[in-house]
Image (cartoon, rainbow, N blue to C red):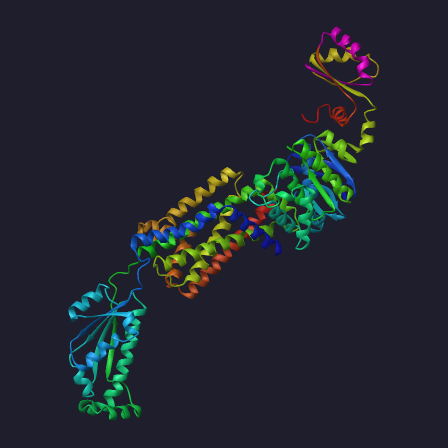
Amino acid sequence: MIEVEQLRKSYGELTAVDGVSFTARPGEIFGLLGPNGAGKTTTIGCISGLLQPTAGCVRVMGHDVVREGTAARRALGVVPQEIALYEDLSAVENLKYWGGSQGLRNPQLRERIREVLELTGLEDRSTDLVKRFSGGMKRRLNFACGIVHRPQVLLLDEPTVGVDPQSRVRLLELVRAQAQAGACVLYTTHYMEEAETLCDRLAIVDHGKVIAAGTLAELRSMLAERDLLRLSGVFQPEAARAAVAPIDQIEVLQAEDNLLVLSLQEASRKLPAIFAALEAAGGEVRGTTLTQPSLESLFIKLTGKELRE
Amino acid sequence: MRFIWISTLKDLWRARRDPFAFTTWLAIPLLIVVMLNVVFGGGGAPVPKGRLLIADEDSSLASNVLATAFHRDPLDKMFVIEKVDRQEGRERIDHGEASAFLIIPKGLQQAFSHNQPFRLQLFTNPSQRISPQIVEETLSLMVEGGFYVQHMAAAELRSANFGAVYRRVMSLQKGPPLIELETQVIQEKKQTKGLGALFLPTMLYMSIWMIAGVQAGDIWKERMSGALRRVAVAPAGLGAFLAGRVVFIALVFGAIAFAGLSVARSMGGVPVANLAGSAAWAMLSGTAFYVLLLLLTMQSSNQYTAHVLVNLVTLPLALVGGCFFPFEIMPAWMAAIGRLTPNGWAVQQFSSILTGSAEAREVALALAGLVAVSALAFVLALRRLRGSFAV
């Protein structure tokens, strides 16, 4: 279990994490979703004991990560964002080293190496040097090194960055298997679809703060089944706002010279009225994107910007 | 403790995977030895014999017995005997062309048979150790034996009654010998060192100094790959990681020093008075260099500036500190400065241990200083790692 209470981490004037709180339970995949620079990696750093929190408290399996660091770290497995492997060693040698760093000894270590190589589909390449692996294989080995000691708590920091679709699917299956085996998994990502398909519960973070948290269903309900309509073209922002305001249950999320983002129900039915109103206000619509309710649209609704911006 | 060994193993595995670098590390000292060997000779030649020059001015039965002792087995396998006159013998021993020069002055037979004191003269070559000693020991034994015979059986010797001589010898309890062996060690005109011996410490430390710099820079690769961050969140931690790395470095330097010195001695003919001691010093001082350079490299903000900084420090220090040129061929002022540098100090200590001229107390003090500096640098490097470098 991971318990984070009012976590804050500052670097001088800059506050990277600002009062973040959440609890992730055993057997659960808890997602931290947010754009780059939102504070996800800093949060993971504080949980793993790599960074000293400025304020707040973090407990891993009941152990305070600051006061009982070693005990907390024994329960942890970390799969970092970067491929933290020795490329001039083989897969088995990497696993021996990282397993050894977690205190594993033979014959248990040997047995676990065999298991994780099989699990990640690398058993045929076990003695090959990592530098000869593809990006996806390196990612899988990176994951294997994080779980070789069967951690109770697994921290995954954007583990699928730069991975081909096939390897991504395999990695996500591996993550699910860890949770099914009883591990508490904290998964950070800026990929909406990953979070939607993988996570049991989520916290959406931006600028170091949790802006929404709950199960996927709870978060979707915050959108009240509204569509998201993005219109590109040439607009006069204030005139455009005023022009669409009379349309039934419409909400303007963003109005700029070349972009208009609207939240509304049954958007496709109301499109002719919206186009007419904007044209009357001197606007010109050149492109239209209609998005059904999703985490993406929730994020845009909450922050006024896209997740990948 | 276990993770220290695993970390050491990890670095040994990595070194094995980069055979070119590893071979280069070993090849540098070996290449130096081969170079010295080619230039100055010594490799593959038959085992050299000692050369004994004898000036027999007595030309008697007694002097002949003395001189022919060296023609008997096993001494005949160890020495080439040459008869010379006094002047030639002195000139040649003065020029170091022989192991020893024995003068048997006129009157030996007379003194021997009349139980009178007599003095033989032996000059030995100070640049050789074993051969002159054998000559000296052999002559001492012969002089002692001769004394007994002379003291109790001079009359029988004169009358050739050998049975009586034997009985007298067995019942003798008197001393001291009347015939004395006077040994003189020729004064060396100038203390000269072979070029191999001169360059060996320099070349070995050039290798060690450069490897220490390169290996210190390797910490940046581990940082950039994220491996340090991963170690930092493991229960074993950064202390064991760093200790393992230091053990690896010590093993590498120990192997290089031992191999280099062994080959220098066996193939290059470079005199190595204390192989184990000098290899141990090279290992410990090289490890200390590594920890100091590691501390230095971790002060930089990025890998590139770290590389530049280490080169800025190591190259000038190598130039003046006896890691490019021996102190003996430097201008005096430069050598004086160089001996004050950390590497220069280590090279000096190494040379003393190598030639066997170092006092035990002096070595112990130097060793204590080296260990203290290494320990301090280790603690500071670990603090830097834990502080922000690994993060």
**Along the viewing direction, whichever of A135 and B297 lies nearer the viewer:** A135
* Span of residues in magenta: A257-284
Indicate the position of residue B24 as horizontal and vertical percent values: 44, 47
Q: Quadrant of residue A254?
A: top right
Question: Which quadrant of the structure image shows residue A128?
Answer: top right
Evaluate whether residue A9 shows in this view: no
Residue A282 included in the magenta stretch of the image: yes
Residue B188 vs A21, above or below: the answer is below
Instruction: In the rendered view, tell whether residue A121 sits above or below residue B89.
Output: above
Above or below, A133 against B168 in this view is: above
**Looking at the image, is B78 positioned above or below residue A290?**
below
- Picture coordinates of residue A133 (x, y %)? 59, 39
State the image coordinates of residue A189 (x, y, percent, origin top left). Answer: 70, 33
Locate residue A149 relative to residue B341 in the image: left or right.
right
Q: Is residue A231 magenta?
A: no
Assign the C terminus of chain A to one quadrant of the image: top right
Front position in the image: B114 or B190:
B114
Q: In the rendered image, is residue B226 in sight?
A: yes
Q: Quadrant of the N terminus of chain A?
A: top right
Residue at the extreme front: A124
- Image position of B53 (left or right of A123): left
Q: Position of residue A93 (x, y in %)?
A: 60, 48
* Number of marks drawn: 0
Residue drawn at point x = 73 percent, y = 23 percent: A304
